[in-house]
Amino acid sequence: MFTHHLHTVGSIKLALSNSLKTLVVIRNPLDSVGSFLAYHSDDLDSVPTERQVRHFLSNYYPYFRFLNDKKDLLHFISFKNMIADKKSTIGGIAEILGLPEFRLSDDLLEDYDRKMRNAETKKDRNAGSLPNKQKEAFQAKVSKLIIADANFPKCSNLFNSLEARTINAVE
């Protein structure tokens, strides 16, 4: 197994060249770019420039175009579904990895959630993994800039196409 948290094609190419089952978590461009901008912001009360938004979306598009080109070799996991239903998502991952007997207990999942919330208290408000009021307000402000960018429709179309292929879709 190979894991990586960079949104680059290099890590995926490496996994595929070694014939590894490759699972890719995908997130819609509005949330993904908004979260990325929040993470890299020094001040969540400020608004990024159109240039910054364009930069992140111009990187998002070729990455998702590559994923689309390799879609038959990859397994996709929706970030939204992963957050909404961790247990089913992990069950789907176990199935892909050939571990059909794997079962995630409620106690283990609760322990994970507790540890995650505890770890969040030690992070800066813009660097946290869990939603918070400041990040939500920041993302609401930048969403207009993201949607207005010329790359947004292309990114959304690619994301929607790939999301239809995700495991254990949660409505």
Image: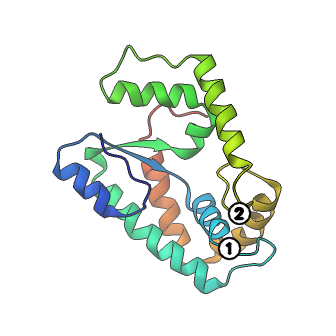
The residue that disc 1 covers is 41
114 or 73: which is nearer to us? 114
Q: Amino acid at mark 1?
A: Ser
- Which residue lies under the disc numbered 2? 126
| Amino acid type of the residue tagged 2 in the rendering | Asn
Q: Residue furthest top?
A: 101
Q: Is residue 10 above or below residue 54?
A: above
Q: Position of residue 71 (x, y in %)?
A: 31, 49
Residue at 25% x, 50% y is: 15
- Dot placed on the residue nearer the N-terminal end, 2 or 1: 1
Q: Does dot 2 land on a helix, a strand or a loop?
A: loop
- Where residue 142 appears, x then y in whole percent? 71, 71
In what quadrant of the picture does the N terminus appear? top left
Quarter of the rendering containing residue 112: top right
Left or right placement of residue 114 versus residue 19 in this view: right
Taking 58 as reference, is 26 above or below it?
above
How much space separates mark 2 and mark 1, taking CA atoms? 7 Å
Q: Residues within 10 Å of mark 2 (few under 14, many from 20)?
A: many
x, y percent for residue 83: 61, 39
Quarter of the picture holding the C terminus: top right
**Secondary structure at numbered mark 1:** loop
- Pick whichever, 39 or 84, lies toward us: 39
Q: Which mark is residue 64?
A: none
Q: In percent of the image, x 77 and y 58: which residue is there? A: 136
